[in-house]
Image (cartoon, rainbow, N blue to C red):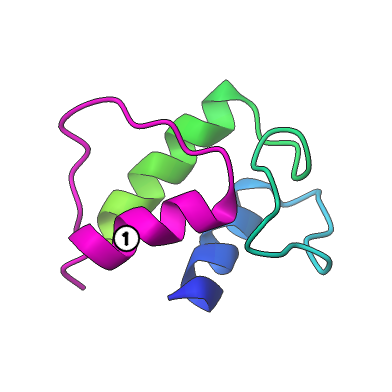
Amino acid sequence: MYERLLKLIQENLPDKDLSNATKESRLIEDLGMDSIGMMMLSMSIEDEFGVTFDAPVTFKTVQDVLNYLEKNATK
């Protein structure tokens, strides 16, 4: 699941080098994700993992996203 998520992040940040990204990496501060990037990542996550964000969620780190997916992913 971690590798799939990193692939989605990379697709949404094609100009960034994510080779040093870890589960503790902060999406905005460390990886450089902006608000549009977060929206695009959310849509990619919905498609890839079969989840639907019915309410706003705030992900700060890669691990936050993984925790959510472990509880909610259907794919």
Q: Position of residue 29 (x, y in %)?
A: 76, 34
| Left or right, 35 with reference to 68 | right
In the figure, 54 relative to 8: above or below? above
Q: Horizontally, is 36 left or right of 34 in the view? A: left
The residue singled out by tag 1 in the image is 69
Of 14 and 42, nearer the camera is 42
The answer to whether any part of residue 14 appears in the image is yes
Give residue 15's position: percent from left, percent from top.
80, 48
Q: For the C terminus, which image quadrant?
A: bottom left
Q: Quadrant of the N terminus?
A: bottom left
Q: How many marks?
A: 1
Mark 1: amino acid = Leu
Question: Would you call the spot at circle 1 few (<14 residues within 10 Å), some (14-19), or many (20 or more)?
Answer: many
Identify the residue at image location x=72%, y=52%.
14
Is residue 11 a member of the stretch shown in magenta? no
Magenta region, residue range: 50-75
Does the image show residue 48? no
Looking at the rendering, which quadrant does residue 34 occupy?
A: top right
Q: Give the quarter of the image for residue 57.
A: top left
69 with respect to 38 (left or right): left
Residue at 57% x, 54% y is 62
In the rendered structure, does residue 73 fall within the stretch colored magenta?
yes
Q: Nearer the viewer, residue 27 or 47?
A: 27
Q: Is residue 42 above or below residue 3?
A: above
Q: Residue at point 78% right, 42% down?
A: 30
Image location (x, y in percent) of residue 25:
70, 52
Secondary structure under badge 1?
helix
